[in-house]
Amino acid sequence: MAESLKSSRADTVQHITTPGGLKVWLVENYAVPLIALNFALVGGAAQDPAGKAGAATMLAGLLDEGAGPYDAEAFHKELDTYAIEMSFGADHDHFSGRMRSLKKHIRPAFDLLRLALNEARLDADTIERVRSQLLAGIKRDAHDPHELASAAWRELAFPGHPYSQATHGTLDSVAAVTREDLLALHRQCFTRDGLHIAVVGAIDAQTLSAELDQVFGSLPERGHRLSIPAIELHNLGTRKIIDLDIPQATIQFGLPGIARHDPDHVAGFVVNHIFGGGSFSARLFKEVREKRGLAYSIHSGLATYEHTALLMGSTSTKNERALESLSVIEDEIAKMAAEGPTEDELIQAKKYLTGSYALRFDTSSKIASQLVHLSTEGFTPAYLDERNALIEAVTLDDARRVARRLFADKKLLVTIAGKPENVAEQG
Amino acid sequence: MLDLTPETSSPRADRPASPAAQNNAAAPDISHFHLDNGLEVVVIPDLRAPIVTHMIWYRNGSADDPAGKSGIAHFLEHLMFKGTVKYPNSAFSDLVSELGGQENAFTSNDFTAYFQRIAKEHLGRMMEMEADRMVNLVLSDEVVAPERDVVLEERRMRTDTDPSAELGEAVQAALFVRHPYGTPVIGWGHEIEGLNRDDALAYYRRFYTPENAILIVAGDVTAQEVRQLAEATYGQIAARGEAPQRIRAKEPPSRARRLVTLNDEKVEQPAHQRVYLVPSYATAAAGEGEALEVLAHILGGGPTSLLYKTLVVDKKLAVAAGAYYWGQALDDSRFFLYGMPAEDISLDELDEAMDDVIADLLRSGIDAQDLARAKTRLVADAIYSQDNQTEMARWYGMSLTTGMNVADVQAWPERIEALNAQDILNAATKWLDRRRSVTGFLLPAA
């Protein structure tokens, strides 16, 4: 067994409670003179006001565009002067932020982060600039096949639910967002409940605690987030074509998945790895790409959102062979539902998944990101040591049962952008 | 801030980062040596996690594709996963996967590289199998034909469905009149269709030799360990005598500014790009490549740059504007400007406004604070990249396959620090000459 599996990764994580009461995970390491900080806040695009999709993305994009005494240009100059990297984003369920600083510049780095989170100015002209950038991005991707296939897929999958909307919104919804909307969203979500912080690098617990209390300590205790209903995947069995004059059909397909804390999640993760996960050994890769040359990219994955769970996949194949690609995918689903993985496939998948876990922890930023992810999913660092044992524990019976659960008697929701030949719409 | 930086189809460093500063106490202790058969070896220690990044780089890329066979370097990269006598079919990939490793490969203008990231105790095994693949590849028509289809699908996915990528190809093709950098790395579609097993094997035998390869190992390993393992594996391959020569057609003088326009009904947001033919680190006079790097940063590296500040923030003519320099190239290379116009602003207006920014810079010189910030940023990147062993390995590989040596890479931050405002201004005056440039307009259907 690899050295990396014998030693405890969880033991490298310090659990800190700052004097101000913030809970933080720290991995202290001085090998490289920098620190990486990642955080997440419950919230994100699902909190966008009705008709104003894109508001969360706009807010995230505005945090480093002027704060406290600095206008946008001055703020960016401060970041540049100290070579501080700082960025913010929003997915459907979370706001997120990341910062990297050289050890010698952590004072200004934490100070600028404090300003961005607490005193973003949201100046009117800056809002208009960021709005125009968001709109340009939407227009740029207006005929992008992946964008079109996923937009159609989301709308069919989650009708009327915030997940049906793109995080970047539409031309109309972005145009409708006001400064007041952004301020309200900030009040709702930038609060100490729902905050997850991890830091990796050249800093001790005491110094970090004092800095973090300055950065996050003044945020309100509680937010007032909209309650988002859970949603099951709709329109299974539907196949929709978005007509686009390009030589290739981009196919997006999906099925219901398995929630993160469902006892079957880990087995589902292993089964998906065998079916269409990342490596060259997956069945979809072998059947669609290697044997038939139908596509360059073919992949499936379990996606777990706060309020739904999916198994999603996609590929791009020339219009003339789109039907063939679809039937190969459907055949593989039927086969996996009927027989499940073979014993050898299960052994190989476990070896890969357990052995490669260490590769997720080889840079400060990756460690910080993994820790925040773990925290938002409701785990503690102990999971870092338990995770491989959970994968080892998946039996062939488990895998077959969960393969049936995922794939048996299920109809795919499929969207296709392009001009696929001989493919009919369904549903 | 929102990022509207264009994607480029060819790999380039996201940031012009250099991995090591000799004057920095924390700089890793890099080892560099050759095996008897000519194979070059670089070892980059990173003891923080018990894993290694193992890469083999070949000093050949798409610019070495024979005439009429564009895409063969990249196609062979795909075919290198098809097995050898000893490890047939996918045995190599299967073992990497079984050992918990990750692997991939990539091709650019001047290099082709293969890598695995894996627990350190498996390094010897990776080296043995990669060395085997350097000389014992087996190809049959049965595996070559579907893989050619895969590459054609890759081309459709990346280029043929994306007007912006199609314009990028047309701009490069117009910029390089004779030199093969004007040909896309993946190849032209009609030439990919004609590539076969014999083409791939001929190319393989010519370039996949110990003299033409560089082994780079980054991670939890000592130079001594790497040397022993390398001698037992790569070292057993017979020398061929000398490295293959890379002889590429030279560019004639550039005398005409060119405009390439692509209209497509899929375009709703117009976009602008301009590419200048400029020296690379390898072909530039001493310090000139570094000056172009700093110039790109001051002119268009992020929200404090002149282009962004003037065109996006102050004049509101654009929603995006920037510049970057592709310095790591064996032959003369490229300096890029890009922009996206604001609503109701034409590409001509944006184009002129860009020229005004450059004219202004040439007239008023380089601001001392702008220069200081650019240097800080670029030199800091050298420290940030020490946090990522794979990035370090990539940086050395790209540098060593494009005419630089280990000392050049290590002294890069010092050379950046040594530049003064006049150096930057001289580079701008000399190289931002529109007669050396091609401008690309991406527009909706006419």
Image (spheres, coloured by chain):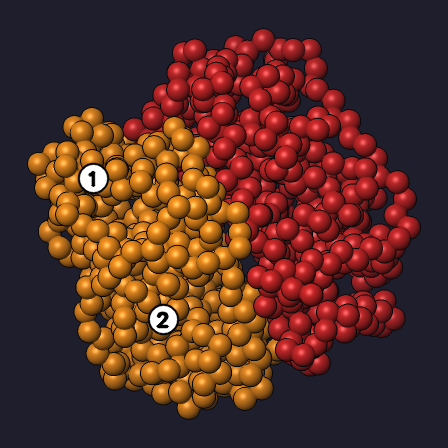
Chain colours: A orange, B red
- Give the label, 1 or 2, closer to the camera: 1
Whether residue B238 sits left or right of residue B287 in the image: it is left
Q: Percent position (x, y) of residue B314?
A: 69, 81
Label 2: few (<14), some (14–19) or many (≥20) C-alpha neighbours in 10 Å:
many
Element under disc 2: loop
Q: Chain of mark 1?
A: A
The residue at the point 60 percent across, 62 percent down is B265
Quadrant into which the C terminus of chain B falls:
bottom right
Looking at the image, is A278 positioned above or below residue A235?
above
Which chain does the residue under circle 2 lie in? Answer: A
The reply to whether residue B410 is visible in this rendering is yes
Q: Is residue A323 left or right of residue A248?
A: left
Give the mark nearest the N terminus, 1 or 2: 2
The image position of residue B278, as x and y in percent, is 80, 48
Do we see residue A390 in this rendering? no
In 3D space, how far apart are the residues under numbered discs 1 and 2 (Cα atoms)?
A: 31 Å
Name the residue: 46% across, 41% down: A320
Looking at the image, residue B22 lies above or below residue B198? below
The amino acid type of the residue labelled 2 equals Gln
Q: Quadrant of residue B209?
A: top right
Query: Could you tell me if the residues under marks 1 and 2 are in contact, i.e. CB atoms within 8 Å?
Result: no
Q: What element does badge 1 sit on? A: helix
Closer to us: B257 or A36: B257
- Residue A209, located in which quarter of the rendered image? bottom left
Q: Tag on residue A334?
A: 1
What number is the disc on residue A165? 2
